Amino acid sequence: MHAKIIFTSDLEDESLIIILKGNQWWPTFDQESSDAENIITEMKASVKESDIPFFLASKKFVLLSAVTETRGTLSFERNSWVLRLLNPSLSLLQLDCQVFVHKCMKHAGQMQKKITFYQTPVQLVERNRKDPIIEGKILASKKERLSYARKQKKVEYAIGIIGFAVFVVLLFATYPWPFRDPGNQAQLWLFTIFEKLIGSVAITALISYAQFYAFYASLHEDAIKWSIAGEPEKKAIKTLI
């Protein structure tokens, strides 16, 4: 299984090395050693043919996770950083992708640096195959998480917003205005309906918005939201660990 993540950042090389070492992805062997060359050769097999010249000519770091045994490279190609990872385990590859994105976001925030991940989905693909098994949406910012939540929970979000607007209108309508005539049966009937509706609308809007917000809050737990590739409904799945 292999995966690729592309991003741009003004983080220095030293900062990226700190992230890699802090996550135990920095190998014990030298970057110019034969072991490093073997990993580069192995990674080359998963690189798209048109990208191979850029990959080989690029500045790159060889990676080897001490925890998951994931192998990979972080290379600077065409003004962007490209992370490529290999691991026969789908779940471990998912985990490494998520951890890398999370660590980069956290470190960039602490250093007050910029980091932007490409909007193309992270695809987990079997070696020697083109079609991904699962793909992930990187949610690196509050704006992206909010947009994703609104897309996935659009019904709950719409009910919450519209319900709140209706609640305000009903609240305004049921105010004891001077023109209201307690002796007018038609007015009494109409305002009684409004007063009964206001509670139901408020409860419905609150429940819907609470469901939307709970989903939005859960997105902070995962830097990448995974879904089954090719599913028409883009069914979300959790990290397989």
Image (cartoon, grey):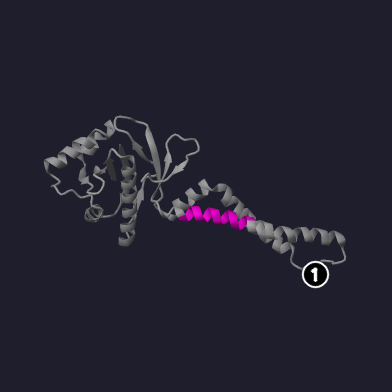
Position of the N terminus, as image quadrant, is top left
Is residue 207 magenta-colored?
yes
Q: Secondary structure at mark 1?
A: loop
Is residue 123 magenta-colored?
no
Question: Which of 101/23 is in front?
Answer: 23
Q: Position of residue 37 (x, y in %)?
A: 15, 39
Residue type indicated by callout 1? Pro
Q: Position of residue 10 (x, y in %)?
A: 29, 54
191 in relation to 234, above or below = below
The magenta-colored residue range is: 204-217
Tell me: 114 left or right of 29. Answer: right
Q: Residue furthest bottom?
A: 178
181 in relation to 141, above or below = below
Tell me the crowding category of disc 1: few under 14, some 14 to 19, or many 20 or more residues within 10 angstroms, Cα based.
few
Is residue 5 in view from this perspective? no
Q: Which residue is mark 1?
A: 178
